Image: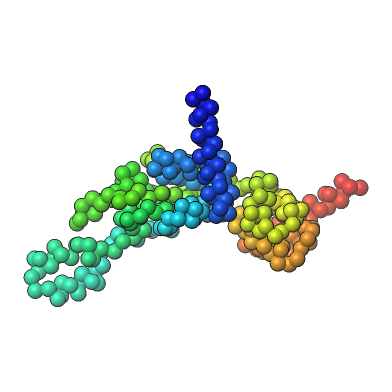
Amino acid sequence: MNQIENRSKLEVLLEETKEGLKSQHYLADDRTATTVSLAFSLKKPILIEGPAGVGKTELAKAISLWKGLPLIRLQCYEGLDEAKALYEWDYRKQLLSLQASKDDSQSVKHLFSEEFLLERPLLAAIRTNEQAVLLIDEIDKAEPEFESMLLELLSDFQVTIPELGTVKAIQRPIVILTSNQMRHLSEALRRRCLYLYIDYPSPEREAAIIHERVPALKDELVDEAAMALSKLRNMDLRKAPSVAEAVDWAESLLAMGIETLDVDIVVQTLNVLIKDHKDIERAKQNLSRLVEGKKKNER
């Protein structure tokens, strides 16, 4: 009986999460819905890995919109440091205050107070009075040292500012970290997170995504587009078409009034899907071979 009750509870939870994300045009599978549900229940961050453009960032945006929570985003890059991610002091304002002050001893103390503190995304996410979705995007682009700084935040949802002391979260944010796997992330960081891997969708799933995002496109054309995308991703391209580019392509086909997909149409619109000249040429050659092979088989 307990197993049946637990199963029923899980199914209700998954259905609620799927429907919530679908309301924001994000189609979640069972694994994604389970991970998101657990993140809410356990109040743990989610580390999402996978190829670029498969919907990792979009998941964070969909959660934010579904729950009606503000999205605070930290875009990671090489050279990102504490001052840009956590906080820094308004040095210009401090200097002006120091020049205007007559009592130097008191002014120096006053310089490192709330008045001169500049919040960056990480500090803003834990000091906000309402719960927020904190998106730490493409963390694999930042140096390993940056991960060490995140550990206190991800474990205890607090940060230490030497001049002010420890700042604890008023409301724990929902934390989403994304990685395109440009480098391996530390085990210490992974242990603090739930893990989710998102890959390119199957043709059936891609068709469902396109139908959700471009409902005016005919079902037959949606299926043809999904199969064409699958073939393109199986080619040896430097950068395979992303899901976002697939949606752009579907919208382009709709705008052009295309009703049936053929190789000529795919070649003509490759620049919507592929953003590298060499990849476009390689795709054209492979598509030509596929057509020639199909004609030989028909004979």
195 or 70, nearer to the observer: 70
Say whether residue 159 is left or right of residue 218: left
**Count of numbered labels shown in the rendering:** 0
The answer to whether residue 117 shows anywhere in this view is yes
Say whether residue 61 is left or right of residue 95: right
Q: Residue furthest bottom?
A: 100
Q: Residue furthest top?
A: 1
Say whether residue 215 is left or right of residue 183: right
Say whether residue 153 is left or right of residue 228: left
Res 70 → quadrant: bottom left
Where does residue 46 sit, x and y in percent of width and height?
Answer: 45, 45
Q: Residue at x 42, y 40 (%)?
A: 41
Where does residue 242 sit, x and y in percent of width and height?
Answer: 61, 55
Where does residue 160 sit, x and y in percent of width and height?
Answer: 25, 51
Vertical comparison of 274 with 227: above or below? below
15 or 105, nearer to the observer: 15
Q: Residue at x 22, y 62 (%)?
A: 114
The answer to whether residue 76 shows anywhere in this view is no
Q: Residue at x 51, y 35 (%)?
A: 10
19 or 39, nearer to the observer: 19
Vertical comparison of 124 with 91: above or below? above
Q: Residue at x 74, y 53 (%)?
A: 219
Res 115 → quadrant: bottom left
Q: How is the image coloured?
A: rainbow
Vertical comparison of 34 with 242: above or below? above
Where does residue 132 sit, x and y in percent of width and height?
Answer: 39, 54
Q: Residue furthest right?
A: 299
